[in-house]
Each structure stands twice: as structure tokens, then as C-alpha cells.
Amino acid sequence: MSPQFQYRSMQEGDLDWVEREERDLHPFPWTRGNFSDSMAAGQAAWVMTDAASPAGYAVVLHVLDEAHLLNISVLRQRQRQGLGAMLLNWIEHDARSRGATQFFLEVRPSNTAALGLYERSGYLQIGRRKGYYPAASGREDALVMRKAL
């Protein structure tokens, strides 16, 4: 039987944990301040948990009828279990309930796991942002993707 997951708003008390996990997961991580600023700005910041512990988190910007994924992460030890798809599906559902009709995101072309998740979830590439992300060798482009909700 698969575990049941809950999705709750990220709180100030989550930020030490989120910052620690973010540093473990990403070569150019968001800072605690980035998460705190997102929450203060009213962006939807979520923590995915099961009975055992937190498993992932996400931040989404909502503007009128659009949602924009700013960050989605599943803890390293919880990856390859379908949790990224579950979290993405849940935040899409939440975006629809807020009136969003389309969902946007950027992804590194080198992040093949995330790119595969987004493609399997129905996202289509609609553009490319040159030099968008910092990278070990300078800058890396971002693929801009969109999904109609």
C-alpha cells in the first residue's frame, strides 16, 4: 500500500529544513531568504509530507489566470518513487482551483529527470531563455514549458 501524502503551506519553521535540503539537491540552490521572500509575497509555498516525514516542497506564483512553477523539489532519498509527479499533479490541481488556465515553468536542458517528468505530465516547450541559469561553466539556457490546465 502506498503512503498517503498531505500538502500543507510552508511555514517559517520549515525554512531551516528546506534550506538544508535545497543545498543538498541543487548546485545553485535557493537561499532561505528566497523562500522567505516568496512566502512574504504571498506565493503558494507547499510542503509534501507523509506519516514519516516531509518528502518535498514547491513554490508557485499565481498571476490572474496563470500559474508559474518557481521551485519543485523531492528529497534525494525519496526520489524515483513517483513523488515528483504526485507533487506536480497536486500543485496543478491547486492552481486550477485558484482559477489558473495555464501553467508555466523553466527547466535546465541538463536536468533530464525533471524534463522527462514535465514532458510525461503534458508540458510542451514554448521557448528558450538564453543564459538563464548559473552553471559551473558560466550560464545555461532554460527551456520554457507550458501546460494548459
Image: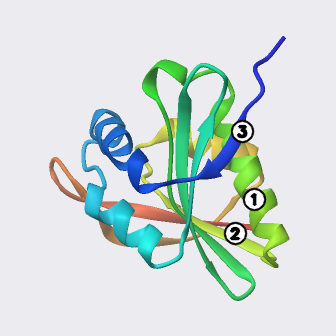
10 Å neighbourhood of mark 2: few (<14), some, or many (≥20)? many
Expressed as whole percent of the image width and height from the top left, the position of residue 130 reads 35, 71
Label 3, secondary structure: give it.
Answer: strand
Q: Amino acid at mark 3?
A: Gln
Q: Residue furthest top?
A: 1
Q: Is residue 149 above or below residue 99?
A: above
Q: Residue at x 44, y 50 (%)?
A: 109
Label 2, secondary structure: give it.
Answer: strand
Q: Mark 1 or mark 3: which comes first in sequence?
A: 3
> How far apart are the two marked residues, 1 and 3, measured between alpha carbons?
15 Å
Q: Quadrant of the C terminus?
A: bottom right
Q: Residue at x 25, y 42 (%)?
A: 27
* Residue 148 seen by the camera: no
Of residue 9 and residue 93, the one placed in the foreground of this image is 9
Label 1, secondary structure: give it.
Answer: helix
- In the picture, measured across the screen, residue 13 lies left or right of residue 105, that is left
Q: Are marks 1 and 3 in contact (CB under 8 Å)?
A: no
Expressed as whole percent of the image width and height from the top left, the position of residue 25 reads 35, 36
Circle number at residue 92:
1
Q: Which residue is mark 3?
A: 6
* Residue 112 seen by the camera: yes
Q: Mark 2 or mark 1: which comes first in sequence?
A: 1
Expressed as whole percent of the image width and height from the top left, the position of residue 88 reads 68, 48
> How far apart are the two marked residues, 3 and 2, measured between alpha carbons?
22 Å
Mark 3 or mark 2: which is in front? Answer: 3
Q: Which residue is mark 2?
A: 103
Question: Residue 53 occupies which quadrant of the picture?
Answer: top right
